[in-house]
Amino acid sequence: MIRVVGVRFRNVGKIYYFSPKNLQIEADDHVIVETARGVEYGKVVLAPRDVEDEKVIQPLKEVIRIATPRTMREKNRTEKRKKKRFGYV
């Protein structure tokens, strides 16, 4: 069994497993993780739990850190700029 948290990067979509390391992570926390696409911001949708080894794609990446209020403000600003640039606002 491997300890993981489930992270989602959009409001809907696939849940990806990450190692919580020794961080105190709970469901609904926002986290910064390393993915194949680089460093990304996501929301924990599955609290830490043990899952069977075969359900985890290796190597299991780790949560880098829990997002701070500043990180969340930066993300919101970036999202607003993207929407404005592409005409969604």
Image (cartoon, rainbow, N blue to C red):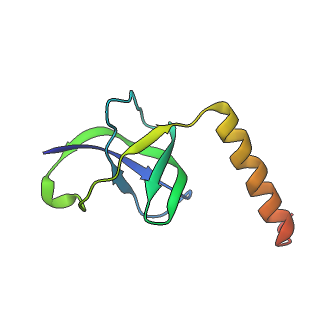
* Quadrant in which residue 10 is drawn: bottom right
* Quadrant in which residue 89 is drawn: bottom right
Q: Is residue 28 above or below residue 15?
A: above
Residue at coordinates 80% horizontally, 64% vertically from top-left? 83
Residue 26 rendering spot, x and y as whole percentages: 41, 32
Callout count: 0
Q: Relative to 40, is 87 on the left or the right?
A: right
**Residue at far top of view:** 24
Asked if one can make out residue 28 in the rendered structure from this viewpoint, the answer is no
56 or 11: nearer the viewer: 56
Residue 63 rendering spot, x and y as whole percentages: 41, 43
26 or 20: nearer the viewer: 20
Residue at coordinates 25% horizontally, 62% vertically from top-left? 57
Q: Relative to 37, is 73 on the left or the right?
A: right
Asked if one can make out residue 44 in the rendered structure from this viewpoint, the answer is yes
Residue 20 rendering spot, x and y as whole percentages: 34, 38
Residue 29 rendering spot, x and y as whole percentages: 50, 36
Residue at coordinates 78% horizontally, 49% vertically from top-left? 77
**Residue at far bottom of view:** 86
